[in-house]
Amino acid sequence: MRPPIDFIFLRQGKVRDVYAVDDDRHLLIVASDRISAFDHVLPNPIPGKGKILTRMSNFWFERTNTIVRNHIVDTEPSFAAWVDDDRWHREELTQRTVLVKKAEPLPIEAIVRGYLVGSGWKEYRQTGCVCGIALSKGLVEAERLPEPIFTPSTKAEVGVHDENISFEKATDLIGLEAAQKVRAISLQLYAFASGIAEQRGIIIADTKFEFGLLDGELILIDELFTPDSSRFWPAESYRPGTSPPSFDKQFVRDYLEQIKWDKLHPPPALPDDVIRKTSRKYEEALKRLTINND
């Protein structure tokens, strides 16, 4: 554990609060209980969610650092003082805070899909392709793809929709060499984690990664294989042709679709039962993937 550090608020993301550290080479990241859907932050938090995201990310960062380096420096940082900030009490920081290397984020999200679902399913029905990748005819919703595919997207600000893009567009944004490296590492990460998850009764239908550059080296940043960044399905209830129940925030998305929220105006408050069920789904994902295994 490093000595206590001082830091100052830098920015607020959809879920995480980011703080600048006095040496300017590190950041302090605090995972809140906020939840977002359709690129909007919802008014209700999911109690304990930030701690679950942090614990799951740390679990996977530790196990994948032989595939690609990541930004983690300390998973249990100590705190000297808050500077100009009243967002958190010190006791709330435990298990939801990490000290990381400061990297330059790439302007794309690296998405790997092993199953045809979500925006990929919608695009396939319209064009027979996903992000410019032609797929076989006659596939059904949630069908397992012959092999996982890399389908990048733009990285949008809060309230703006991410846009699925082709690999060629990704090369325009970050260069061919970087795009090829991001694709290869992303597919390797997905294969590694999917194998572990399947042994524990979870299908990782798709997931997204974020990468950054540190002294010219590509590293993994943000979060990794969490219910916010991945679609987790219970293997025992998986059936092609329907979207299976999930251990992630798809439950919240489904509720918002059910009430026909237009995704433009501020999102509605979540009912108590949706909050409770979402919390249980996150806890179940953590239990299946990491408890007694980390």
Image (tube, grey):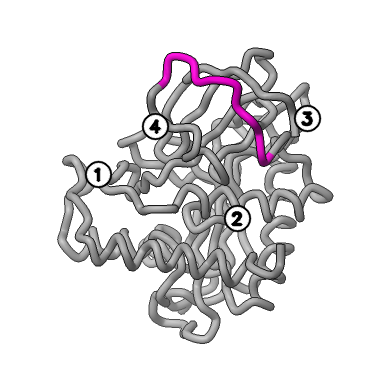
Q: Residue at x 68, y 48 (%)?
A: 183
Q: CA distance from mark 1 to mark 2?
A: 24 Å
Dot 4 corresponds to which residue?
157
Q: CA distance from mark 4 to mark 1?
A: 17 Å
Mark in the foreground, 3 or 2: 2
Q: Residue at x 67, y 41 (%)?
A: 75
Q: Give the class, few, some or many, for how many residues have Cα within 10 Å of label 1's Cα (few <14, many ≥20).
A: few
Range drawn in magenta: 75-85
User: What's the residue type where badge 3 is placed?
Assistant: Glu
Dot 2 corresponds to which residue?
56
Looking at the image, is 240 positioned above or below residue 271?
below
Q: CA distance from mark 1 to mark 3?
A: 38 Å
Q: Residue 38 appears at what percent x and percent y? A: 32, 48
Dot 3 corresponds to which residue?
217
**Nearest to N terminus: mark 3 or mark 2:** 2
Q: Secondary structure at mark 3?
A: strand
**Residue nearest the observer in this picture, 219 or 98:** 98
Q: Give the class, few, some or many, for how many residues have Cα within 10 Å of label 2's Cα (few <14, many ≥20).
A: many
